[in-house]
Each structure stands twice: as structure tokens, then as C-alpha cells.
Amino acid sequence: MEIAVKQKLFRIGMLLSLALAPAIAAGQPNTNAAVAAQRVTNAPPGQIIAYYFHGTVRCETCLKIEKQARELIERRYKSELDAKRLVFQPVNYDEPGNAHYLQDYKLPCPSLTLVWRESGKDIQSKMLGQTWTLVETPPEFNQYVEREVGIFLNELNSGTDGGATSTNSAAAETIPESAPAIMVDSLADMNTRFGYMNAAFVFVHATNTPSLTNWVPINHARQALAAGWDIKVGLFEWKPNAVDFHLLVERLPGFKLPAVVIVLRNGTMTMVSKELTETNLVQEFTYAVSCGGCCPLGEP
């Protein structure tokens, strides 16, 4: 992952800008609103819909996630598909009439999302955020998707939903308020430790000396994002004596330290430098995703 700081020229809302991603027009499925509405209308009373939400402009990773998910579901769950208890349904949220899906399921970017519907109403939903990082390892990708679809089908068959409307597994992985950060001393060090994280918060001290840090709002923001989007968000702390300390500060002009630098997997960066609250961190993370291209949480 090459980390490149991008100065934001303007702030935009969730998923209004996908123009940075390379357009791949060939091979895209027909996902117009009329087809989507017809499938829902013809659905049985209880049904699991595996939506693949995407925009008009798409990158190779986005197309690959859809292709692998479709192939796995069609191979593993043929009988459920034939009975229409399970449907795989691509939807272009940029097309007229589909924009509501962005808010309905709080989509950060193109996403495979499972929805359990009963008599036309949503009972549960889950966005499978880990597809972004597992797509390059098909066995792990297939295991992940198969497990999550199986859980939804079992709940549909048993008729129990636990009263939940969102079942993202990351919600159960509580991050302690005092969870420590991984200390790093260079950009190369952080890149090495990034691993399967989708993104990271990097705390940078105000000076080249240590200071007390309130990790509570930072960890609360990480927990909210992990639970809501089913992603892995790491926490790093820039060593005060790090070799790249001044380099990093120089590449982030106009911001006041201390600060939290938000780094997406594709290298997009932004910063929260005033009030390090949970709300500000989550909002800035959302802005970074909206500016980061087609699949900013999964592209290497």
C-alpha cells in the first residue's frame, strides 16, 4: 500500500464521488430499477436477498467481488435459489429510484449486503464488508460468504430474528476503550503492519515528545465503524522520535496537532485535528471513503 496524502479541495456527502475509479463498462449486469422491483414483487413471503450494490463507474475489484459472490452462491445454494428463498440481486444505486439504498443500508461504497425480508419488510440486514480484503484470497472469500449466507438462511428457516435489524458480526467484537495503539516509527513500518486491516487511525502527537492521549473517543469510533460496516480498523501511534515524524507533519500542512490521520487501504488520507470526538472521526472517515474511489477499503 503506497500511502499518498490527498488534500481535500471540497467536502462531499457519502458516495457522491466515484469518478476516481477506472471505468470498466464491459460485462456489467443489467440492474435497472424495473428488474429489481419485479424480483421483489415476485418474492415468497420469506426470502434472503444477497444484494450487490454498486455505482455506474466501477473498478476491477468491484467487478471481481460481484463475480465471485455470484458464482459461490449459485454453486453452493442452487436449491435455495430455485425455490426463491434466496436471490442474488445486483443493484446500481446511481440509477433513478435506487439512491434510497445508500441510506437504507448505510452503504459506504460498493457492497455485498444480505437482507432477510418477510412479507415485503426487512427483518435483518448485514453488509459483508470483509469481501473487500478477502477478494484476492478466493478460499477465504468463499468461506466467509458461504458462512454468512448460511447463517441468514438458518435464521429464516427457524423463523427467529432476535429482534435485530442489523447483525454485523463485528458488533460482538468489542474494542476496549483503553485499547492501546500499535507504535510505528516510519511509513514503511505502518505499511508492513497494515495486514488485513481495511483502514487505520494514526494518532500523531503535537510535538516530538510524548503526551497523554484520550483513547476513548478514538476507540468508540473504531467500534462503531467495525460494527456498522463489518470492517477491520487498526489503531497506530506515531512515535515522537520516529524517523518520518517531520516528513508526515510537512505533508499535512494547515492542520493543528495533535491529530488523528485516517488512512484507507488504497492509500487515501485525511485528518481530524480539532475536536477528536467519535462523531468527528466517523464523519471524516465517511468523507474519506466517498472520495477514495470505487473500492477504497479493499484495493491494495
Image (cartoon, rainbow, N blue to C red):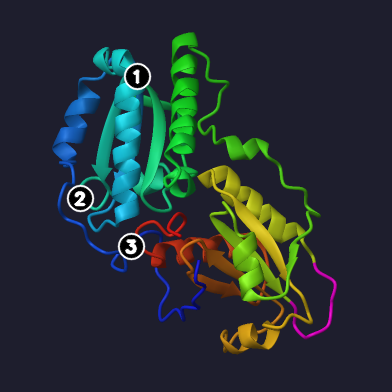
With respect to residue 124, does 129 lie above or below? below
Residue drawn at x 45%, y 11% as measured from the top left: 157
Which of the two labelled residues, at mark 2 and mark 1, occupies the earlier sequence position? 1
- Between circles 2 and 1, the one closer to the viewer is 1
- Under circle 2, the secondary element is loop
Disc 2: which residue: 95
Disc 1: which residue: 77
Label 2, residues with CA under 10 Å away: few <14, some 14-19, many ≥20: few
What whole-number distance in Å separates the C-alpha atoms at marks 3 and 2? Answer: 13 Å
Looking at the rendered structure, the kind of residue marked 2 is Glu
What whole-number distance in Å separates the C-alpha atoms at marks 3 and 1? Answer: 34 Å
Is 283 positioned to the left or the right of 179 in the image?
left
Q: Main secondary structure of the magenta part?
A: loop
Q: Position of residue 205 (x, y in %)?
A: 75, 78
Disc 2 to disc 1: CB gap under 8 Å: no
Look at the image and tell me whether residue 100 can be seen. no
Look at the image and tell me whether residue 290 can be seen. yes
Which of the two labelled residues, at mark 3 and mark 2, occupies the earlier sequence position? 3
Label 3, residues with CA under 10 Å away: few <14, some 14-19, many ≥20: few
> Residue 161 versus residue 231: which sits nearer the camera?
231
Looking at the rendered structure, the kind of residue marked 3 is Leu
Residue drawn at x 50%, y 31% as measured from the top left: 165
Disc 3: which residue: 16
Residue drawn at x 49%, y 10% as measured from the top left: 158
Q: Quadrant of residue 278?
A: bottom right
Range shown magenta: 205-213
Residue drawn at x 21%, y 34% as measured from the top left: 36
Q: Hey, which residue is sitting farthest top in the picture?
A: 158
